[in-house]
Amino acid sequence: MAYAWVRGEFVDDAAASVSVFDHGLVVGDGAFETIAVLDGRPFALTRHLKRLERTAEGMGLPAPKTEEVAGAVTELVHMNGMRFAKIRLTYTAGNAGLGSGRSGEEPLTVVAMQPIEMEPASTQVALAPWPRNERGILAGLKTTSYAENVVALAWANNRGASEVIFANTVGNLCEGSGSNIFVVKGEEIFTPPLSAGPLAGVTRDLVVEGMGASEADIPIADLFKGEVTEIFITSTIRMVQGVSRFDDRQLTPAPGPVTAAAQEYFSRLVGRDMDP
C-alpha cells in the first residue's frame, strides 16, 4: 500500500477521492508541481514550492500553505519508502460547482507519489504542427490545464518520439509538453527566454545557472542547420537528456560532448545538494 496526502490527511492512495465539484476536475482550474525523489530524498523542493506560489498568484488563487506542504512531502517520502519516485503536488481552486466561476471555497491540496525508472541518456522528439501561444493568459504558469499537451504528446508518440516540441506564434523555439529545450552552437548553450513562452523549469534554471547558458530567441529553422550541433531537453524526471533525433534531423553522437558535460554537472549537483 502507498499513501497520499489529501486535505491535510495521509490516506491510502487507492482509496483517496476528491469531490465531483472540484474546480480542478471540472475545468482544470489548478496548479501543480512534479518533484523527483532521488535515492529517497526530494530534489529541489524549495524551488518547486516557490514556483507553485508563483503559479497560484498568476492564476489568482490563494497562496498555498507551502510550509505545511513541505512537511507533508517529507513525511510522505518517509512513509512510502520509495528510493526513486515522482511526487505530484496538485493545488486546485476547490469545490465550485459545474461552471467556470469560482466559489471562493478552501483550495484543495493533494500530494501523491509513484515509483519511476531513470530516463535514458538520449531520446527522440517531434516538432508540433501547432504553436504555443507565448502571449496567452497561462503562458509560463504550471497549471493543470494540460489537454493541449496530452493531445500533442500522443501525436508525437505515434511518430516514435518521446516528447513534442512547440514553436511559439512568431516561429521561435518555445518548449516541450513537459520539458525545456536547449541548443548548442559551437560550445555555447542557448535556451529560449521566458518571453518566448516557456515555463521557467526548475531543471532549466539550474542548468542556466550552472552551465552559463544564454537566453535567446531561436528561430525553429536554426534547429535544422549545421550551426546547431547538439540539442537537449530538461525536466524534473528527464533531468538533462540528449536529443538523438529532432523531427527528421538525426544528431550524432547523442548525447554530444556539451550535453554530456551538462549531464555530468547535474549529476554532481544532485550528489552534493538536494535542495539547491
Image (cartoon, rainbow, N blue to C red):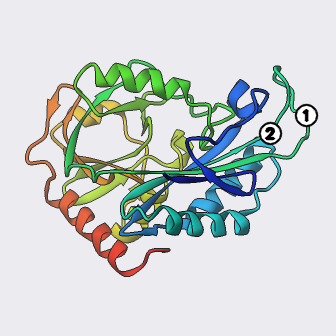
| Residue 51 in the image: above or below residue 129 | below
Q: Residues within 10 Å of mark 1 (few under 14, many from 20)?
A: few
- Residue corresponding to mark 2: 94
Q: Which image quarter: residue 134? A: top right
- The amino acid on which the numbered mark 1 sits, given as a three-letter code, is Ser
Q: Nearer the viewer, residue 275 or 5?
A: 5
Extreme residue toward the right, this view: 104
Residue 193 seen: yes
Marks 1/2: CA–CA distance: 8 Å
> What element does badge 1 sit on?
loop
- The amino acid on which the numbered mark 2 sits, given as a three-letter code, is Gly
Residue at the image point whose x is 64% and y is 31% from the top: 136
Q: Nearer the viewer, residue 76 or 119?
A: 76
Q: Which mark is residue 103?
A: 1
Extreme residue toward the front, this view: 1
Q: Which image quarter: residue 218? A: top left
Q: Position of residue 27 (x, y in %)?
A: 71, 25
Q: Are marks 1 and 2 in contact (CB under 8 Å)?
A: yes
Q: Which image quarter: residue 186? A: bottom left
> What element does badge 2 sit on?
loop
Q: Residues within 10 Å of mark 2 (few under 14, many from 20)?
A: many
Q: Position of residue 105 (x, y in %)?
A: 89, 41
Q: Position of residue 275 (x, y in %)?
A: 50, 74
Decide which of tag 1 and tag 2 comes sooner along the chain.
2
State how many labels appear. 2
Q: Position of residue 18 (x, y in %)?
A: 71, 36
| Residue 234 in the image: above or below residue 75 | above
Residue at the image point whose x is 81% and y is 44% from the top: 60
Q: Nearer the viewer, residue 240 or 192?
A: 240
Extreme residue toward the left, this view: 253
Q: Which mark is residue 142?
A: none
